Image: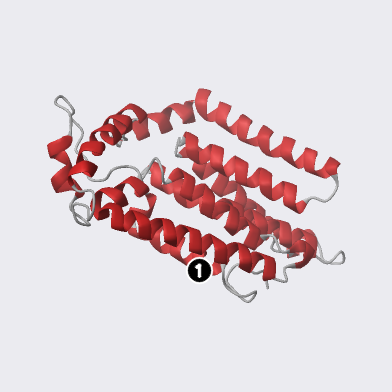
Amino acid sequence: MTPTNFAGVMELATPWIAGYTWMAWRRRSPSTPLRETRIPFLAAATLLCLLSVLATASKAGAALVAISLAVLALVACRGWRQRVAILVGVVSLVGLLTVGLRYLPLGTRIREFVDATGQVSEIDRFVAWRASTAMIKDYAVTGSGFGSFRDVFPAYIPSGEYQRWYRAHNDYLQVVLEGGAIAAVLMLWLIWNYWRRALGAMRRRPHGPHDYAPIGVVLGLPARAVHASGDEHAQVPANALLITTLRANAIAPREGLVDLP
């Protein structure tokens, strides 16, 4: 798993665990000491997830996680002062960590690690996506066949391109390339039908005023879906399993995985 793909996992986990933390805080008993609750553990887990996505040096991952946390804060807070304070805190924390990783020695080491893994740059992606248009024309209806991208795509790469392309670094584009117009229609139908059911489940869920973990899941899923337009998260088996599990949970009854006992 590359650092960028790990950032995709953190996009799912961070708002989910942050929602857990907020639920635990709202449901805590005033008579129970803070150290005896699960809040310190959940808060540490949230911070660890946030640090992890920043350590991957994924710009899209950091931005999407920050947006998800900001939206979660807006939903969780009732008064406008609380909402402003939370938003300022999230933005400030992300900004400080980003600056620290940019200029501190740790940030230099992380960038060197990312460079050493041979990550594909934004320019390389645009070159590949432009070359894929010719492949789409040749396999417009049924595609080249699922799993055939690494064998077929090299014939369409411009001369002088040195990257070895095993994936298109765009989950949606790869579905179209390998499955053609038929797969594209099925994918659009699946996306529409899933979110129709997920949003309906959220409206029917009796989550009350303090049930924020399901909201974190619903925020993490579109964050990962947006990032999928520039990477191949769903094609990593471990990522695909987590995505499928959380998607199923988003439309599950209240007794699902995301609820806090």
Nearer to me, 190 or 32? 190
**Total numbered labels:** 1
Quarter-of-image position of residue 67? top right
Kindly state the secondary structure of the residue where label 1 is placed.
helix
Q: Position of residue 30 (x, y in %)?
A: 87, 64
Instruction: Say which residue label 1 marks.
Output: 248
Quarter-of-image position of residue 165? top left
Residue at horizontal 66 percent and vertical 53 percent from the top: 43
Quarter that holds the C terminus: bottom right
Query: Is residue 223 found left or right of 118 in the rendered image?
Result: right
Nearer to me, 207 or 16? 207
Q: Residues within 10 Å of mark 1 (few under 14, many from 20)?
A: some
Residue at horizontal 39 percent and vertical 40 percent from the top: 230
Q: Position of residue 256 (x, y in %)?
A: 59, 73
Q: Is residue 16 above or below residue 90?
A: below
Q: Is residue 212 above or below residue 114?
A: below
Q: Is residue 170 above or below residue 104?
A: below
Nearer to me, 83 or 134? 134
Query: Is residue 154 found left or right of 70 in the rendered image?
Result: left
Q: Position of residue 223 (x, y in %)?
A: 52, 47
Does the rendering let one see residue 25? yes
Nearer to me, 177 or 97? 177
Residue at horizontal 83 percent and vertical 51 percent from the top: 78
Q: Position of residue 253 (x, y in %)?
A: 61, 75
Task: Name the residue type under label 1.
Answer: Ala
Does the rendering let one see residue 35? no
